[in-house]
Image: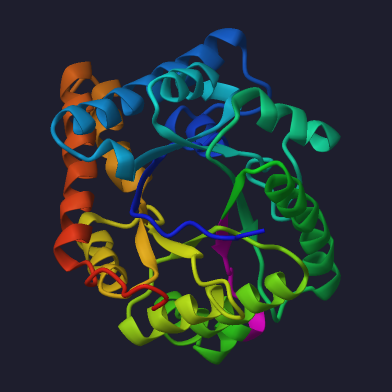
Amino acid sequence: MTIGFDKPLYVLPFDHRATFQTKMFGWKGTLTPAQSEEITGVKRVIYDGFKAALAAGVPKERAGILVDEQFGSDILRDAARNGISIALTVEKSGQEEFDFEYGEEFARHIEAFNPTFAKVLVRYNPEGDRALNQRQASRLKRLSDYLHGSGRMLMFELLVPATKTQLDRVHGDQKAYDRELRPGLMVQAIRQLQDSGVEPDVWKIEGIDRREDCEKVVAAARRNGRDKVGCIVLGRGEDDAKVREWLAVAASVPGFIGFAVGRTSFWEPLMNWRAKKATRDEAVAGIARLYQEWVTTFEQHSAPVRRAGGG
């Protein structure tokens, strides 16, 4: 079984569910069919922005979308029909502990859409609650084994939220935690998860400020013969300048194959459209422009193509 995906991968993620419901629309509780359709309509604007970027020259073979089944099932089907790489979210939204969106039915839902990747978002701090980490790792191993046994791939979004003790060590400064502590904790988390039998093909990594920390993350992701495993950098809702900085640093490191930048690509264009400060077409064009900008930034700073067997 060969693990890994090491071709360029530029993902536009819009699998957000709780974020859209509560932060964009301000809705709580169970959605009505009309509310669900409104969120679906917003996701169609993002997808149209993605397609506009492809039409403007973003290479289709490097592009992909990450969407959820709840609000994006039509989009997933359309992308599959059009030969676009798709990643399908399989975790419950907004949970501190990873669990499957559809419980024991997770495999049936993946098979219905046959995505390129099944994607999980996992909060995992290697110095955090050990029992929690073990429960999560056990579920994730099930998913990893199932995917590789059925010829599919796993995209793993690793978030390492600080423990109180860790934040205390940097006097409560989140930026200092991100710079000084988080990179080393990510390396530990990757190793622990691999040792638990969880084998992502692509690691989706929070932005890293220093090149040498990116190199350490790649070394962990690719250790012990996992030579083809790729890393992509995520945007974390940061402003344009910070996202460009993270993209430039990551792109310079062999093993970082691309990015997944969501909210920074679509939030402002969508909010302007919803506030009637922009037309739908303008929102689509704005999303396309930002996504194209991330592609350009990444490619301008990309490491030379790895030598065979290198990395």
Decide if residue 108 is in sight here: yes
> Furthest-top residue in view?
34
Coloration of the structure image? rainbow
Mark yes or no: residue 172 visible.
no
Residue 209 in the image, given as x and y percentages of width and height: 33, 77
Q: Is residue 188 left or right of residue 300?
A: right
Task: Name the one closer to the observer, 24 or 248.
Answer: 248
Q: Nearer the viewer, residue 282 or 184?
A: 184
The residue at the point 40 percent across, 27 percent down is 83
Q: Position of residue 305 (x, y in %)?
A: 26, 68
Q: Residue at x 54, y 60 (%)?
A: 4
- Quarter of the image for residue 235 reads bottom left
- Residue 183 is inside the magenta segment: no
Tell me the quadrant of the picture where the N terminus can be found. bottom right
Task: Report the quarter where the C terminus lies.
Answer: bottom left
Q: Position of residue 95 (x, y in %)?
A: 69, 48
Looking at the image, residue 223 sits to the left or right of residue 52; the answer is: right
Magenta residues (range): 156-165
Residue most extreme to the bottom: 169
Residue 210: image x %, image y %? Answer: 32, 82
Residue 49 higher or lower than 188, as above or below: above
> Relative to 161, is 77 on the left or the right?
left
